[in-house]
Image: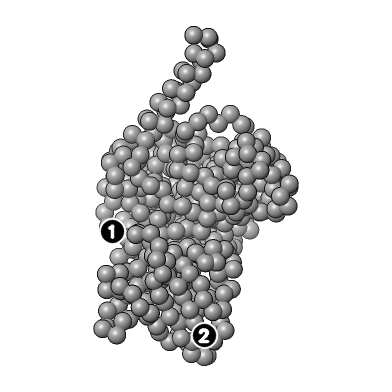
Amino acid sequence: MPVVSAVCIIFVFSIMFVMKKIQEIAIAEYDYPLPDERIAKYPLAQRDSSKLLLYNKGVVSEDVFSNLPKYIPQNALMVFNNTKVIQARLRFRKETGALIEVFCLEPEQPCDYQQIFLETKECVWQCLVGNSNRWKGGVLSQVVEVGGKNVTLSVERVGGPAAVNHVRFSWDGGVSFAELLEAAGELPIPPYLNRRTEESDTRTYQTVYSKIKGSVAAPTAGLHFTPAVLEALTAAGVEREEVTLHVGAGTFKPVKSELIADHEMHEEYIEVRKALIEKIVAAGGEAVAVGTTSVRTLESLYFLGELVAENPAVTQDELHVNQWTPYNREHSLTTVDSLKALLEWMERNGLDRVHSHTQIMIAPGYRYRIVKAIVTNFHQPKSTLLLLVSAFVDGDWRTIYDYALANGFRFLSYGDSSLLIP
């Protein structure tokens, strides 16, 4: 057998071995005791007064979040997710009295987020339906007051896959769907809070820099930031930029399988401006990510660049990062070369921003390409977000979580935060 062929065979088997090793990760190894009283049911009155755990190359300490700018390297590029949580939960009552809950997940027709919120007559969403077995068919309606006038909003199931329903919304009055959601919808807070949404959540469950509507869950690492902290970052020489990843209900989907190979990652919509990609290239292909949503967006850029480098004729509709893309082959492009390929593709296609979907699974064994530091909250046991953190700190996640549990940190969406520098 020629030497080159033998080397290729060995290399292929090496890739297969690595992927198999990652897929055989047992989620039970990423469990930890989380008493209900450690889950923050409400945020602190002052966002930036939360505790900040500092993990710097294996050393753990703590501070207050308002002091975060002291720990971000000068001239760093810090990336935030500017998505805004929509009031995605609507309730309708049948004539029989049965309560039907319709939870908007993702636009179906039109499939563009900005366009669907501007619709003034009808649209179709992918939805979860609560009490689904009581709604076999037919139209449900309710009267909603929007801007001082009554609008009749109707919903009808129009198909879709088994787990997700396609629901058509139709209404009169000439108001936008965005206005309808504001008037009739309810902000969906995480199920593990075990309480109903309250008026205060409409303010506290949004970041101060949220602006692009589309999420059904907040990018919670950003909830700690205040205008004062953002100004202090700028004063410290940190450049701030934004991406958009609309968080779906799948972010709360528990890993029920024993091995992560059997867990299907949820798909998420991302949008990144060309100007940001240029700044990442100028920064040597490095950035600080605020939240795991920003992590998934930034890391997906590498694989999008690789895709267009190998397939220059690919269209924007064909851009997609699959769950196992990072593991199923060799990825030899440098980060900067991959991002430059993406920029060249955008230039050829006259695009000032890239739209895509990602299902990226970041688990131990993953090699980070862009993200060099992460601001993030403390995540649920046996979750894909905990796998992401473990991959970032080279498996040392228990050091972080043991410290947080032993030192009074508050957990999950409304809890405290951490800055991770591996």
Q: Which mark is residue 254?
A: none
Q: In this view, does 418 lie to the left or right of 280?
A: left
Residue 346 visible: yes
Where residue 55 sits: x, y (%)?
Answer: 46, 41
Distance from disc 1 to disc 2, alpha carbons, whole Å, reads: 46 Å
Disc 1 residue crowd, few under 14, some 14–19, many 20+, Cα 10 Å: few
Where residue 229 sits: x, y (%)?
Answer: 58, 57
Sequence-first disc among 1 and 2: 1
Where residue 20 sits: x, y (%)?
Answer: 38, 30
According to the picture, the residue beneath numbered tag 1 turns out to be: 37
Secondary structure at badge 2 equals: loop
Res 201 → quadrant? bottom left
Q: At x 57% / y 48%, what residue is drawn?
A: 318
Where residue 4 sits: x, y (%)?
Answer: 55, 13
Secondary structure at badge 1 equals: helix
Q: At x 54% / y 63%, what residue is drawn?
A: 111
Q: At x 40% / y 62%, what residue is drawn?
A: 160
Q: At x 30% / y 69%, what residue is drawn?
A: 132
- Label 1 sits on what residue type? Glu
- Label 2 sits on what residue type? Asp
Q: In this view, does 1 lie above or below 96?
A: above
Q: Give the mark count.
A: 2
According to the picture, the residue beneath numbered tag 2 turns out to be: 172
From the viewer's perspective, is the residue at label 1 or at label 2 nearer?
2
Q: Nearer the viewer, residue 213 or 312?
A: 312
